[in-house]
Amino acid sequence: MSLIAQAAKGGLPVSLITQELLIVLMLGAGTDCGLFLAFRVREELSRSAAPHQAAIGALTRIGQTITYSAITVAAALLLASFSQYRGLGPGRCSAKPT
């Protein structure tokens, strides 16, 4: 949120719903990532890996999934046709709600 605030202070117009939507996206993404990680760690532990190695293996395996998920969300915001979401993409921001 501080990055968005700094961008707005720097003159980049930011949609009025950006802060609320960011909270929802972060809670959703955080839950998904946490579940991915927990299940992968359990999977690694079931293969008799040491706890530290299980965590490393899980992080290695879900990194690509999390990256593609983030790219998908960013692309959806950039390509959104719904006017309130379209204002969230770079270069399309509006200081006024539409």
Image (cartoon, rainbow, N blue to C red):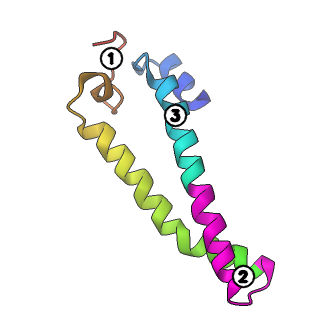
Q: Nearer the viewer, mark 1 or mark 3?
A: 3
Position of residue 79 measured from the top left corner of the image (x, y, whole percent): 23, 39
Q: Amino acid at mark 2?
A: Leu
Could you give the CA–CA distance between mark 2 and mark 3, rounded to whole angstroms? 32 Å
Pick whichever, 91 or 81, lies toward us: 81
Dot 1: element: loop
Q: Residue at x 42, y 20 (%)?
A: 14
Farthest residue toward the bottom?
48
Q: Quadrant of the C terminus?
A: top left
Task: Indicate which disc, 1 or 2, sits on the residue closer to the N terminus.
Answer: 2
Disc 1 versus disc 2: distance between alpha carbons? Answer: 49 Å
- The answer to whether marks 2 and 3 mark residues whose Cβ atoms lie closer than 8 Å is no
Quadrant of the rendered image containing residue 45:
bottom right
Q: Provide the residue designation for mark 1.
A: 94
Q: Residue furthest top?
A: 96
For the N terminus, the image quarter is: top right
**Height in image: 90 above or below 58?**
above
Query: In the rendered view, would you say 96 is above or below 82?
Result: above
Magenta region? 33-52
Question: In the image, 75: left or right of 17?
Answer: left
- Residue 85 is covered by the magenta coloring: no
Q: CA distance from mark 1 to mark 3?
A: 20 Å
Question: What residue sits right under mark 2 in the picture?
Answer: 45
Q: Which of disc 3 and disc 1 is earlier in sequence?
A: 3
